[in-house]
Image (cartoon, rainbow, N blue to C red):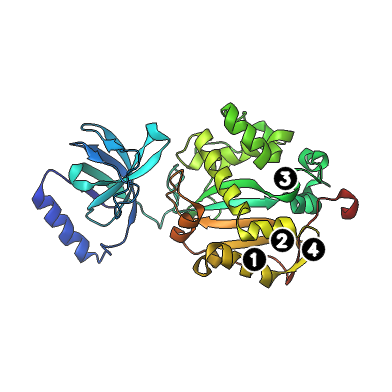
Amino acid sequence: MLFIKLGQDASMIKSTTLFLLFCSFNIHASHAVSGTFEATKSCPAYISKNNKTNPDNLMVQPTYHYPIKEVNRVPPDWVRVEFPDNHNTLRWVSASCGITEYNERDTTRCSSDAGMADSYVLAMSSQSGFCETYGYEAGKPECRKISRNSYQASHLTLHGLWPNQDACGQRYGFCGVRPQANHCDYSPVELSPAVAEKLKIIMPSYYYGSCLERHEWNKHGSCQILTTDDYFTLAMRLTTETDQTIFGHYLTEHKGEVIKLGTLRELIATSFGKKNADKVYLGCKSGVLVDIFIQLPPLMPLNEPLSSLIDKAPIYSGRDSCPANVIISNFSKEAWF
């Protein structure tokens, strides 16, 4: 665990630098950290430190303390701080504008604390595929009540936005929360009316009362720092952006067809870039497409485009769990049974 304090003692910086060189750190790589930045003067807070973009003229203010999420190098020239009062906006600020105290995250140990993710996964569903292979037979109300002409029957829906820790494997979840046996055993999730109305469309389980949103918030939302509104707004935006890609349009236009897995992989590469194709993977059950997963980075400003976020995401070692020929389910209960 590395502790650094800047802005007070030049000799301390020198000794810290020697220590880092001794330990063979890569000083040019960004580092995920946790700590605080105390501004000693007013300075601009940039979306991009390289392009100096600050469209809303956001500034750090003297004596204010800001949570630090990332540094550009060790010791840092720039720190990426969070503005909790601005919808948890993340911005780059020059390290010379204040006093920086942080711990570099130990990525070899699993932590059950919130905000310690080293990546995220956006999990989406083919609602029709989910209902055909599981949900309808299990009595899920969203599967029994949705009409085949509904938005959900033809478009990707939100399953969840999952913060991950590589050191935890599948165990990073329920941060400070006791797991419940049933989704609806958790307390209702508090959402603003505008967010709630949109979530009813993008996550039909919420509208029809099977409480997936409660499970997702308590298992995964508890391990990150956004409010309920911001968390679900971000997840819905990313789901909609995926649905509007060439890949997403293709799924909508080819319902009820059997498509070669290779064709879907080509569409993924076209939609997200060849270098990012391995960051998107598909899940099937009985040959039917059910899940679409996208690997994302640990730091996600609310308005950063999906294409940019995927560029920054680590490559996942997993693979598609689909056969060579994939069924794109049509929302037809008569055809299922």
The circle on residue 257 is: 4
Which mark's residue is nearer the viewer, 4 or 2?
4
Horizontally, is 83 left or right of 231 in the view?
left
**Mark closest to the chain's N terminus, 3 or 1:** 3
| Label 2: how many Cα within 10 Å (few below 14, some 14–19, many 20+) | many
- Mark 2 to mark 1 CA distance (whole Å): 8 Å
Measuring 72% from the left and 61% from the top, which residue is drawn there? 284
The residue lying toward the viewer, choosing from 108 and 272, is: 272
> Disc 2 or disc 3, which is closer to the eye?
3
Q: What distance separates the C-alpha of mark 3 from that of mark 1? A: 23 Å
The residue under the point 76% across, 54% down is 129
Residue 97: horizontal and vertical position, in percent?
A: 19, 42
| Label 3 sits on residue | 152
Give the mark nearest the N terminus, 3 or 4: 3
Q: In which quarter of the image is residue 173?
A: top right
Q: Mark 2 points at which residue?
A: 284
Name which quarter of the figure residue 55 lies in.
top left
What crowding class fits label 1: few (fewer than 14 Cα within 10 Å), some (14-19), or many (20 or more)?
A: some
Q: Which of marks 2 and 1 is nearer the N terminus?
A: 2
* Mark carried by residue 92: none
Residue 182 seen from this side: no
